[in-house]
Structures are given as structure tokens and as C-alpha cells.
Image (cartoon, rainbow, N blue to C red):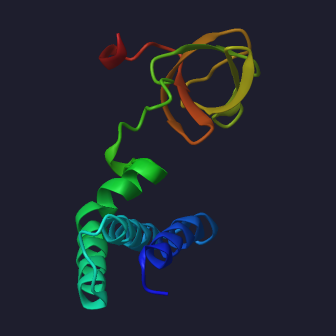
Amino acid sequence: MTGYPFWLMLGLILLISEFFAPGMIAAFFGIGALVVGLLTMFGVIETLPAQLTLFALISLGALFGLRKRFKRWMKGATSDRSQRDQDDSGLVGVRVKVLTDFNNGIGHVSHSGAKWDAESSDPLKAGDPAWVVSHRGIVLTVSGTLPTNLS
């Protein structure tokens, strides 16, 4: 079985296998097999050596030429978090309400109805307003005065 049905079946099997073992490799060989199958079906190529050569050229060309673009399209682009703005959450500069007195620089604040763990070098009391100057994960660093670089 070396005619166009073989190439079309091989192409479909390779494309379907990509769903079960994703790696963005089998899909390009599947595309190569489908192209060879269609060209064989329409009589453009007939001999087995020509089919194998074209299959190899199309598959490898697609693999090395398009894999990076398809991988980004299929999985989405990612970026290194260390190169992104450290305040991607938009918390720095936000006014918060102090919920508990700060003992040893540790207390709780309220922002948008949620209770946050907070740290401060200022002696803050419950009910005082404060501003977020930085954060480390889910711990906010707050100040009792609005820093001049945030105003």
C-alpha cells in the first residue's frame, strides 16, 4: 500500500496522534504525508522514491520552519516574570484601611473588602489609612503617609 490512500491515512494518524502525545512534531510529519497523499492522488508524483523524498522535504521543512510559530500559537506566549513590571497586580500606591494595630511591624489591612497581611515600619493603629508601597506575594508593605514618588 504505497498509493495515495496510504499517505492520507498516515497523515491523519499522525495529526490525531498529536492530540494524545503533544510535542508539536508528529503534526508536521502528518502535514507532509497529507501533502504527498494529495499530490499522489492528483497524479503530480507517482514513484515511491519521489513520494518519500517529497515527504521528507515537506515534513522537515515544516518542522524546522514553522514549529516555533505553531508552538507559540498552540500554547500561548510566555514571558519571564523577572523581566515584567513587579507591580503587575496594581497594588502599589493604593489606599488601604488598617484593620488591626501593628505589633512588631505586622498587622492586617483591608483592600477592596479583602483582609491582607501587612508589614509596616510605621506605628499604625486600627482605623488608620495607609498606602501600599510594595508587596511580596500576598504580604503588603504599607506606610502611614503617601510616599512622594507615588503621588
Res 103 → quadrant = top right
**Residue sticking out furthest to the bottom:** 49
Res 33 → quadrant = bottom left
Q: Nearer the viewer, residue 32 or 112?
A: 32
On screen, residue 88 versus residue 61, left or right, reads: right
Q: Work out whether 112 lies above or below 24.
A: above
The quadrant the C terminus occupies is top left
Q: Work out whether 103 lies above or below 14.
A: above
Q: Position of residue 89 (x, y in %)?
A: 50, 29
Q: Nearer the viewer, residue 149 or 12?
A: 12
Q: Work out whether 105 lies above or below 148.
A: below
Point 25% across, 75% down: residue:
45
Q: Position of residue 27 (x, y in %)?
A: 45, 67
**Residue sticking out furthest to the front:** 43
Q: Is residue 80 visible?
A: no
Q: Position of residue 85 (x, y in %)?
A: 36, 36
Point 60% across, 63% down: residue:
19
Q: Is residue 140 visible?
A: yes
Q: Nearer the viewer, residue 18 or 48?
A: 48
Report how many numbered discs are placed on residues in the image. Answer: 0
Q: Position of residue 11 (x, y in %)?
A: 47, 70
On screen, residue 20 versus residue 76, left or right, reads: right
